[in-house]
Image: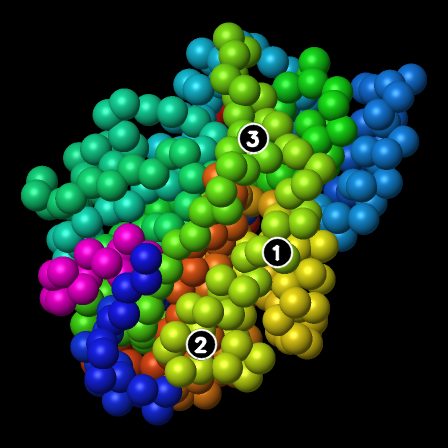
Amino acid sequence: MEFLSDENSDEKGIGEFSMPTLCRPAVMLPEYVITQEETLDLARLLHAGDPNLPLALRLIENTGVRERHLIQPIGKTLEHPGFETRNRIYEQHAKARLPEVIQGALENAGLAAVDIDAIIYVSCTGFMMPSMTAWLINNLGFGSGTRQLPIAQLGCAAGGAAINRAHDFCRGYPEANVLIVSCEFCSLCYQPSDTDVGSLLSNGLFGDAVAAAVVRGSGGTGVRLARNGSHLIPHTESWIFYAVKSTGFHFRLDKRVPTTMQPLAPVLRGLVDGHGWDIGDLDFYIVHAGGPRILDDLSGYLGIDSRAFRHSRATLTECGNIASAVVLDALARLFAEGRVQEHGRGVIAGFGPGITAEMAIGTWSSGRDGHPTHAFRRKSSSNGKGPPE
């Protein structure tokens, strides 16, 4: 099913000011860094003699990931203190790191916490009940009537899903504002006993990050969301999944996952065609980058110059796969580049378990409300006020 924001809008932006606006994201990368060279050396040391190691090393080298950011030093990351302890670490670091990135997103949107009507919190690397949304409302100045929508089981697709559900909410409540928060500590899912190729690859692919963005029901600078859609490839539940055990989340990846762009590219094209646009002639493309082949295949199937995915590639290179935060980080890079013209058209897409695609299209607007759009992208530093170790 697809949802259209304004039936009377066209590619020149007529009616666009009734559309919700996805404002500039704030992104925070943890302070500990591991390079690809260090990752390969650790894999050779920790898994010496494993028959899957040579293939895994080649796959890691081909990811294009130059470095990744971690919430703990590598020595701590490689430890497995148990699922309970890891989940406690997740909660501690989330509470320590989220306030600053949320404040950055609010500043970017020209809003305060009291202006937010709903919070969508996405994460697949830790579990809390009540959701982190309750803690945010109680501690960061949000109203007690703020709606809560935690999304925990869409994996990498959750970033796109959060944007789409915020879009839907603002269409139902045109003056509402929705805060999207992504908190992904993938390093807490490291399982030293898993030596299948998919698990070894994930050890060199995934990174940690927190990100946030606001969708404003009216006003603001950014992407005026026009239409969104979802698609599930039938009978692919076992292609990406967690095996949940006493030791925590064990990531499983089927070798067929890189082929998913063949069936998903026509779906993405159909969403854009349905709005009267040509997918080969858009001004920006923000796509979740699970790996370089995803972007290469999507470029080929859609007939798009590979340079169009430069922001997604930069996220992959500099951060690794940061799960639901990828689309927000790539979008932040689009803002930073500052090259999209008024009414420029684009697409945002996230892919994840299911196999699920969450897609949106919209037009660029500089806004008419006078609110500034600040750049907020920080790397945390270890100090007396920093997150717990």
Location of residue 175 in the rendering, given as x and y in whole percent from the top left corner:
12, 66
Q: Residue at x 90, y 31 (%)?
A: 54
Between discs 3 and 2, the one toward the N terminus: 3
Q: Secondary structure at mark 2?
A: helix
Q: Residue at x 62, y 24 (%)?
A: 190
Amino acid at pointer 1 = Met
Q: Secondary structure at mark 3?
A: loop
Magenta-span inclusion, residue 165: yes
Q: Secondary structure at mark 1?
A: helix
Main SS, magenta region, reads helix
Give me the C-alpha separation between circle 1 and circle 2.
Answer: 17 Å
Evaluate whether residue 167 shows in this view. yes
Q: Is residue 356 above or below residue 338?
A: above
Foreground residue among 109 and 193: 193
Q: Any mark on residue 357, and which?
A: none
Residue pointed to by mark 1: 261
Q: Quadrant of residue 201?
A: top right
Q: Residue at x 52, y 77 (%)?
A: 279
Foreground residue among 110 and 258: 258
Between discs 1 and 2, the one toward the N terminus: 1
Amino acid at pointer 2 = Asp
Residue pointed to by mark 2: 273
Q: Quadrant of residue 309?
A: bottom right
Location of residue 322 in the rendering, given as x and y in whole percent from the top left corner:
55, 44
Q: Residues within 10 Å of mark 2 (few under 14, many from 20)?
A: few
Residue pointed to by mark 3: 238
Q: Which residues are magenta?
A: 164-177
